[in-house]
Amino acid sequence: MAVVAEQMLPEVLAAYDFGGLIVGAPRFGKGHINDTFCVYAQDEEGDCLRWILQRMSAAAFHHPDQLMQNIVGVTTHLRRAAEAAGRDPARACLQVAPTRAGEDWYTDSEGGAWRAYPFVEGTRCLQTAETPELFYASAVAFGQFQYMLRDYPADTLFETIEHFHDTEARLAAFEQAAQADKLGRAKSAEDEIAFVRARRADCSVALAALREGRLPLRVTHNDTKLNNVLIDKASGVGICIIDLDTVMPGLAINDFGDSIRFGANHCAEDERDLSKVNFDLALFETYTRGFLQGAQGSLTDAELDYLPWGARLMTLECGIRFLTDYLAGDTYFHIQREGQNLDRARTQFKLVRDMEEQWQAMAEAVGRCR
Ligand code: ADP
Ligand code: GN1
Ligand code: MG
């Protein structure tokens, strides 16, 4: 997208009724994909209303209309499920805010696609698992999310990013970027490139199980980072799953695995000191217990068997994606400094190595939770 999001803000803010005088709309959050702003509006009583306003990434999402249709469908379903369970639907799920024209999203005059949600108040969004209890709370919420969507009609969902967790396709894209080496960066990533090439066969493990009918296709979130769940400040319970852009048919082990990748350690995703990057087996077990509790018995035996693979593959795949973006010129993941995507790839590969070393213990941990 050529135009910086800030440039379009006045036009986009005018397209919505935020219920008061807009007093500010700074950037917000730590997402890598969309341009996210928090809108502060002062109502007649002087109270502050907050909204999340986002420009959807044009690099990631090529059909915002289809994407928003998915989100409207899924949030409507989740709202009903929340009501049925006696939860406050305004806090239990995202709610798409209409534009003044009554649409679910707004296209600006430069072609950027925007949407807004009420800010879910009284919540926290964590960047690391501050305590095992909070990590457990996130696991229950993601497990529940899986459970609530078990009866969602998968064939009504558009594939918002094709081959999103197709690890074989990610590997092929990586090879292409490494061979093209259009910025001459491959030299600086020789070890990481070799690391991936030594694990080509791993990239097919989950896909083979899917092709052979051992793992079922479900409706999954596909981006289950800790910062995609909002935790209630007062109770510490995970109450609202956000970032629904990639809700699509997928594998439950990938939802499990992506959370482990991001949360079962004590470092930032772009930590440069790899001595600080360590896979935490205890947090792995904590998350497993929470996820299975939330999923309420909806996972098959084969899915439980493959949970460690979900963790290892999502970590490897994410590292491959960061490395590919580094080699291709940082066009997909937002960066704040040069080399950040290479640093991100390195943390992922360190975690993969740790998981390989603790492979047996991971299976035993799952065994204790089932
Ligand atoms: P990205 O795809 O770029 O990660 P997200 O949809 O995850 O975008 O939003 C980025 C951040 O904005 C989240 O990590 C969270 O901090 C915050 N956020 C998004 N939606 C809400 C909401 N409805 N209420 C409160 N915070 C939100
Ligand atoms: C992106 O959107 P965000 O920041 O929650 C990415 C995920 C990656 C993650 C790595 C749509 O997640 O797939 O795992 O970064 N989302 C998309 O941190 O590509
Ligand atoms: Mg996010």
Image (tube, grey):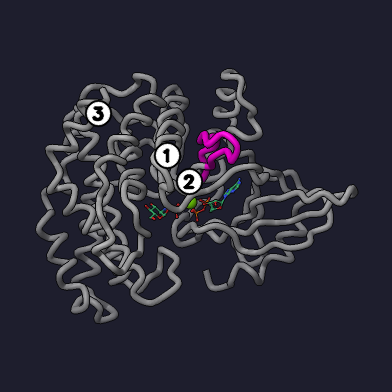
Please tell me which residue lies in front, 51 or 274: 274
* Marks 3, 2: nearer the viewer: 2
Q: Is residue 28 above or below residue 152?
A: below
Q: Is residue 107 visible?
A: yes
| Beta carbon at label 2 within 8 Å of ligand 3 | yes
Which residue is rendered at x = 66% and y = 72% of the image?
A: 7
Instruction: Indicate left or right for 113 with 300 as reference.
Output: right
Return the disc, 1 or 3, that comes first in the chain's sequence: 1
Question: Label 2, label 1: how many angstroms apart (C-alpha)?
Answer: 10 Å
Q: Which mark is residue 303?
A: 3
Residue, disc 1:
221
x then y, percent, for residue 128: 42, 51
x then y, percent, for residue 229: 49, 42
Numbered disc 1: secondary structure: loop
Numbered disc 3: secondary structure: helix
Return the disc, 2 or 1, that comes first in the chain's sequence: 1
Residue, disc 2:
228
Quarter of the figure with the C terminus: top left
Indicate whether residue 353 is drawn in magenta.
Answer: no
Of all residues, the one furthest to the bottom in this rendering is: 184
Numbered disc 2: secondary structure: helix
Question: Label 3, label 2: how many angstroms apart (C-alpha)?
Answer: 23 Å
Indicate whether residue 238 is drawn in magenta.
Answer: yes
Please tell me which residue lies in front, 365 or 100: 365
Residue numbers of the magenta segment: 230-242
x then y, percent, for residue 150: 42, 24
Give the number of callouts: 3
Q: Which mark is residue 180?
A: none
Q: Amino acid at mark 3?
A: Glu
